[in-house]
């Protein structure tokens, strides 16, 4: 068709929460929602698109369900299939829609494409060649398990959803014995998709090196699910009306997985950011901030719930501040609402504000991910990441988001232990001193190269193919000279020469590429991005190795080790974990692209846990740094370091592991990444989360 | 009164003949089978002949030379009891407590060894409604695990992760199955013969444990099902001892409780009961039980028939061929999920295992004066819930009212539960007060049926649990009898000549001259004379 462009969105129907709310008269009207997800021109049956592939195989029932074709005219004309528990094709549509929405939220906040974590090892734990490790699509199995469970499998790069027969006996909580599908819960889908996205951004977050590691993964996934509730307009207005605008009272927006919770006899949602059911009276009671709780809560979901509650409290504070004027306007200046329902106009305005604040907070939460150390992340690090990220996006905190976040987190006992005060200034990550800056610039690539790295994704879709012709093959994808082909790292001259070729390749747009169709370009876009990142990683690694060798003065070299968190004295390999662009807004409102570089290194340590067995165990101790680089100036804006040479940090990790092993017993080894020296490692499913407690300790 | 025979337990050739107790006391013979319980107790009888009580007779399939040694044990049992066991106690349905009755059923069926009474927990009573309900659940779960294991066998070759899982599952299953790992063939014919002989439903699904219990029930002259809190039961034929029944409890919550409150499942996705119920239904669906009605099966499917397609259908579809693949070696292999759902079988196995442990018949056998004498505590493999349930029990002896604190405080011999694992001996109750082992007195004697080397080869088995072992050593001042050798040199080792147990009045011990296949002693004897304390 001449002149027509593809639509910006595809509209799809979903359950706003889950099927259980369909049966409640109060919520039935809003439980069916329509979401707009990115239009994928080439969407195949499955749905199978650029990011996701839904494959509906059901091994427990030995059945297969036909893939839904969302490009079928009938479905295009009526926003997809109507919500239905009994139609597996609708299930496929819903997981696709909610997962796509979640991806979109991340892409918008981060200003770049979402990539899944690479597949580095095959089933037998053999390392795969770097260009075979790209995983284009997250696999989704809507009916994979027959249990009350759903999880992200880092080995399969897949989400596995379960279904089960409800065990509740009270029919008010749902049909006793009826089938509950976890893939029909918006929250479960958003939660699991977030696990997968987070794994793609920070692979090392899966490793429990401190109390916060696993809790953070859970909290983050819950936060995304909760804040996404606010993007569903019908639901939001309905709940604003129901709570008369006071979102700190019991409401559906703050609850997670209602049907799931009820069907498993909890009598309430799986989790609730605001309150809980009093076990004695059976009534909902709000939870109040308790800074000491963080000291005594170790179970990952429970500890994660504290972070969720803290961020949600910040949301409420901001929301209240932003709507105080509306309430005053609506009440002739009194600011106190009278009895009964509130005016629909007010509902709409309040919903507007709530939605804005929620979207903004979600963005802040996501953007902070670029401002985290590459390993051993704690809640305290996340607080500093939140603040630093926000300062870099919004210069004047006119609406006091940062103050609300800091004070709410503080009320729940979440703050970094290594800052002097809890002011915004002292929470910002440190900027290198001029002397440190000079040292860093000695080992970092030239500005022209840094600019190429930051902008390559925008200027050169075809760079990768050109690169192949130039004969610039990366070695081991940015790490590991020993085991991959070459024994000796390339010389500085070789590296510089390769860099020249890289830059030429990317600054030069292939005429061939322009002739490709939009769809064809989209199909290879993310793969090329991935391969480019690996290529830049290779280059940067070789560059760092060559450059640090030229620094011979002991003090200077040690200083560099301290800055980058990497031991440049030992033979231990290090890895360029990631090179990514990150968008920043300047005070004058213009946007700018920074470069996020993550360097990591690991050592194998031995520990003698008091878990009742007299066996030494191995664990990984990691260090490294996240650098935020301003490519135009070649300056490092922030250097967020976890030193591998830090003996005190190693002792902390060891103490953490010892304490966990002592409390949880020998069953917990796999959970904390400990293994016997003679043990063969086999892939685990960390998210199945089997929490088995120790008996003897009690 | 019968004529008093001279005290023969000090006789030189004491070990060749019957096991004889000291006058007014008891001789405890602990067979050293490794991972497996078998205890023969001889009480001074009202008549000249001692009263023989056998508590369990089994060995774990993973125990090296277990079957060979079991043959020696059964030979000795026949000899030591002169072919008649007055009282058999089967604590619970696990192979490492029952396998001897199956593998040597012939000796019982042909009259080599006869059985007087049989004591079982109420959970084994076919006419008990609670027990029947538990059994139905257990049978379904067991069938499900077996089916899962079978499916895993087909997939395990392609994946080390699955192979490891299958191994763990097999190890866990070994507990309830007599006959996993090759035992079946050897005994299959016998097995079939017994099934008809014992009048059981003729089916392959009769487990070895069921078989053992059926055999005991058939051979025993009298069966008593015991309930916790029953008034102290005099042991038949003797005045020197009586038994207090401590467990298993009737309370479902306690039976299910293998974890302490620290095992927080609340915030996790998986709540065991939920997942496992649906899971079992699914596996059994795959079994195509002929008994199940078509309609009944239909409703267990998640979707109506018109939405379901078969694997064969999918194998012809380009979409599924490209995105899933069905061939073991194609490029999609690493992402297939054919057996991921079976991981729940592991949890089910563990749950079943611990639940069965909690159905252990727990006996406190009191010697000497009622309400005052020393106590022998045989806990089977009772786990947390079973231990906790004892607190609500009260007994009247004469004018006195006794409770568990009193019994624990008088414990002289403790048969350590579950091979001294980390989860079958309590030291505190759920309120945080001292309980269990902490209430037992200093100077007790511990009997641990364990083989550290064999246990270490089983995934997830950590026995003996070091922290428990340290407390046991302190409490017993080192007076521990283990059924393995070479792991703890600091223990005093009994010689073949009876000697006083260091620091314990009225107790002597010795080891057997009879040897296991590895040349180590086949059993230890511990003789308690309450009159001498």
Image (cartoon, coloured by chain):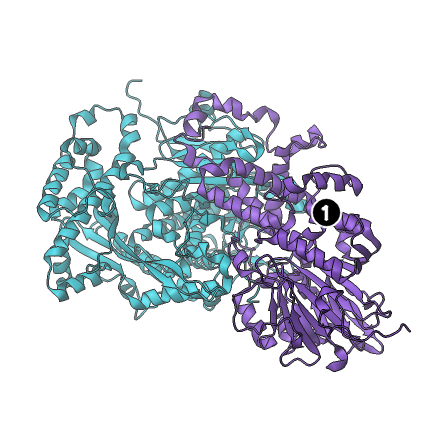
Chain colours: A cyan, B purple
Outermost residue, left side: A493
Quadrant of res B519: bottom right
Residue A608 percent location from the top left of the image:
41, 65
Q: Is any part of residue B37 visible from this angle?
A: yes
**Relative to B273, A383 lies left or right:** left
Report x, y in % for residue A216. 41, 55
Whether residue A31 is visible to the viewer of this picture, yes or no, is no
Indicate the quadrant containing the N terminus of chain B: top left, top right, bottom left or bottom right.
bottom right
Name the image quarter holding residue B248: bottom right
Q: Is residue A457 left or right of residue A127?
A: left
Q: Indicate the quadrant where residue B199 lies.
A: top right
Spot the residue most to the front.
B12
The residue closer to the viewer here, A584 or B301, is B301
Q: For label 1, count other residues whose C-alpha is less than 10 Å away and answer few (under 14), some (14-19) or many (20+).
A: many
Is A113 on the left or on the right of B74, as rendered? left
> Which residue in the protein does label 1 denote?
B210
- Give whichever of B103, A324 is nearer the camera: B103
Above-or-below relation of A110 to A515: below
Q: The disc numbered 1 marks a residue on which chain?
A: B
Judging from the image, what secondary structure is the residue with disc 1 in? helix
Q: Position of residue A481 (x, y in %)?
A: 22, 47
* Residue at the image point whose x is 50% and y is 31% from the top: A57
Q: Is residue A600 left or right of residue B313?
A: left
């Amino acid at each position: 068709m001449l002149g027509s462009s593809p639509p910006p969105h595809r509209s799809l129907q979903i359950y706003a929460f889950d099927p259980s709310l369909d049966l409640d008269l109060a919520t039935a009207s809003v439980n069916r929602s329509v979401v707009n997800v990115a239009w994928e021109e080439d969407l195949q049956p499955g749905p199978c698109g650029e990011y996701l592939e839904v494959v509906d195989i059901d091994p427990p029932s030995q059945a297969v369900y036909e893939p839904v074709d969302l490009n079928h005219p009938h479905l295009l004309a009526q926003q997809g299939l109507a919500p239905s528990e009994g139609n597996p094709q609708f299930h496929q549509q819903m997981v696709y829609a909610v997962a796509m929405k979640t991806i979109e939220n991340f892409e918008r906040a981060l200003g770049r494409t979402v990539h899944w974590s690479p597949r580095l090892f095959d089933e037998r734990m053999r390392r795969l060649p770097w260009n075979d490790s790209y995983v284009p699509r997250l696999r989704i199995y809507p009916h994979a398990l027959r249990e009350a469970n759903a999880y992200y499998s880092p080995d399969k790069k897949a989400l596995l959803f379960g279904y089960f027969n409800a065990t509740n006996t009270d029919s008010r909580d749902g049909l006793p014995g009826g089938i509950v599908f976890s893939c029909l819960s918006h929250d479960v889908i958003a939660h699991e998709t977030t696990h997968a996205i987070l794994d793609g951004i920070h692979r090392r977050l899966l490793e429990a090196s401190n109390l916060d590691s696993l809790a953070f993964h859970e909290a983050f996934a819950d936060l995304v699910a909760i804040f996404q509730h606010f993007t569903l307009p019908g639901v939001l207005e309905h709940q604003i009306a129901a709570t008369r605008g006071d979102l700190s009272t019991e409401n559906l927006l703050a609850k997670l997985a209602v049907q799931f919770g009820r069907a498993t006899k909890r009598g309430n949602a799986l989790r609730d950011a605001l309150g809980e059911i009093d076990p004695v009276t059976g009534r909902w009671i709000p939870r109040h901030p308790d800074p000491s709780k963080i000291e005594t809560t170790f179970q990952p979901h429970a500890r994660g719930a504290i972070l969720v509650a803290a961020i949600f409290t910040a949301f409420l504070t901001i929301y209240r501040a932003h709507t105080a004027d509306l309430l005053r306007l609506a009440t002739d200046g009194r600011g106190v609402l009278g009895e009964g329902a509130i005016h629909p106009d007010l509902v709409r305005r309040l919903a507007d504000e709530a939605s804005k604040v929620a979207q903004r907070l979600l963005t802040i939460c996501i953007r902070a991910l670029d401002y985290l150390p590459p390993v051993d992340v704690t809640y305290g690090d996340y607080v500093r990441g939140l603040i630093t990220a926000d300062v870099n996006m919004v210069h004047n905190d006119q609406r006091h988001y940062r103050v609300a976040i800091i004070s709410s987190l503080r009320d729940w006992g979440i703050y970094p232990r290594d800052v002097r005060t809890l002011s915004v200034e002292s929470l910002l990550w440190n900027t290198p001193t001029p002397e440190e800056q000079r040292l860093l610039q000695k080992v970092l690539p030239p500005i022209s190269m840094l600019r190429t790295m930051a902008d390559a994704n925008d200027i050169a879709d075809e760079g990768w193919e050109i690169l192949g012709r130039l004969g610039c093959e990366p070695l081991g994808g940015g790490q590991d000279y020993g085991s991959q082909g070459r024994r000796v790292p390339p010389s500085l001259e070789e590296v510089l020469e390769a860099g020249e070729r890289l830059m030429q390749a990317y600054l030069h747009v292939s005429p061939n590429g322009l002739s490709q169709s939009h769809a064809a370009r989209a199909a290879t876009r993310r793969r090329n991005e991935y391969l480019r990142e690996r290529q830049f990683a290779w280059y940067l690694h070789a560059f760092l190795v060559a450059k640090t060798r030229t620094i011979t003065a002991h003090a200077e070299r040690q200083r560099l080790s301290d800055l980058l968190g990497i031991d440049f004295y030992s033979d231990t390999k290090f890895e360029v974990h990631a090179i990514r662009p990150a968008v920043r807004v300047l005070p004058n409102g213009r946007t700018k692209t920074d470069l996020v570089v993550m360097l990591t290194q690991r050592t194998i340590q031995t520990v003698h846990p008091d878990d009742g067995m007299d066996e030494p165990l191995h664990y990984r101790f990691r260090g490294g740094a996240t650098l935020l680089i301003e490519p135009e100036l070649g300056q490092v804006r922030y250097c967020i370091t976890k030193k591998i040479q830090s003996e005190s940090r190693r002792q902390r990790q060891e103490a953490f592991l010892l304490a966990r092993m002592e409390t949880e017993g020998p069953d917990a080894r796999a959970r904390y990444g400990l293994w016997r020296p003679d043990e063969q490692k086999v892939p685990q499913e960390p998210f199945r989360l089997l929490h088995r407690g120790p008996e003897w300790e009690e | 009164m019968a004529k008093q025979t001279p005290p023969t337990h000090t006789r030189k050739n004491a070990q060749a003949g019957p096991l004889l107790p000291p006058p007014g006391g008891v001789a405890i013979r602990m067979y050293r089978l490794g991972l497996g319980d078998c205890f023969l107790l001889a009480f001074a009888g009202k008549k000249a002949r001692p009263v023989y009580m056998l508590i369990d007779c089994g060995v774990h399939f993973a125990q090296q030379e277990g079957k060979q040694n079991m043959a020696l044990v059964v030979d000795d049992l026949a000899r030591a009891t002169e072919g008649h066991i007055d009282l058999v106690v089967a604590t619970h349905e696990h192979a490492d407590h029952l396998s001897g009755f199956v593998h040597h059923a012939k000796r019982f069926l042909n009259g080599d060894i006869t059985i007087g009474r049989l004591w079982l927990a109420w959970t084994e009573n076919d006419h008990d409604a609670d027990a029947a309900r538990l059994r139905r659940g257990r049978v379904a779960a067991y069938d499900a695990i077996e089916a899962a294991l079978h499916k895993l066998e087909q997939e395990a070759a392609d994946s080390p992760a699955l192979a490891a899982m299958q191994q763990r599952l097999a190890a866990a299953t070994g507990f309830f199955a007599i006959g996993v790992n090759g035992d079946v063939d050897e005994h299959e014919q016998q097995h079939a013969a017994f099934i008809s002989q014992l009048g059981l439903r003729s089916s392959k699904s009769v487990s070895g444990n069921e078989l053992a219990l059926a055999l005991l029930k058939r051979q025993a002259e009298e069966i008593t099902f015991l309930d916790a809190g029953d008034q102290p039961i005099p042991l038949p034929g003797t005045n020197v001892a009586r038994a207090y029944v401590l467990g298993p409890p009737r309370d479902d919550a306690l039976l299910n409780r293998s974890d302490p409150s620290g095992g927080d499942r609340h915030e996790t996705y998986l709540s065991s009961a939920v997942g496992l119920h649906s899971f079992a239904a699914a596996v059994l669906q795959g079994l195509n039980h002929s008994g199940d009605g078509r309609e009944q099966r239909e409703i267990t499917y998640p979707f109506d028939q018109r939405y379901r397609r078969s694997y064969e259908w999918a194998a012809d579809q380009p979409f599924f061929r490209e995105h899933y693949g069905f061939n073991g070696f194609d490029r999609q292999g690493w992402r297939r999920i054919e057996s991921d759902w079976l991981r729940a079988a592991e949890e089910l196995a563990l749950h079943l295992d611990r639940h069965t442990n909690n159905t252990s018949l727990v006996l406190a056998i009191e010697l000497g004066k009622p309400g005052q004498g020393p106590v022998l505590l045989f806990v089977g493999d009772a786990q947390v819930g079973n231990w906790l349930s004892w607190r609500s029990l009260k007994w009247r002896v004469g004018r006195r009212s006794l409770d568990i604190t009193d019994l624990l405080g008088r414990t002289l011999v403790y048969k350590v539960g579950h091979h001294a694992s980390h989860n079958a001996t309590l030291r505190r109750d759920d309120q945080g007060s001292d309980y269990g082992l902490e209430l037992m007195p200093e100077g007790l004697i511990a009997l641990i049926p364990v083989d550290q080397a064999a246990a270490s080869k089983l995934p997830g088995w950590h026995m003996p649990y070091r922290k428990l072992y340290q407390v046991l050593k302190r409490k017993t001042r080192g007076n521990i009898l283990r059924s393995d050798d070479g792991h703890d040199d600091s223990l005093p080792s009994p010689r073949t000549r009876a000697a006083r147990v260091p620091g314990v009045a009225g107790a002597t011990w010795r080891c057997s001259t009879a040897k296991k296949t590895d040349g180590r002693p086949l059993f230890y004897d511990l003789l308690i004379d309450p009159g001498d304390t």
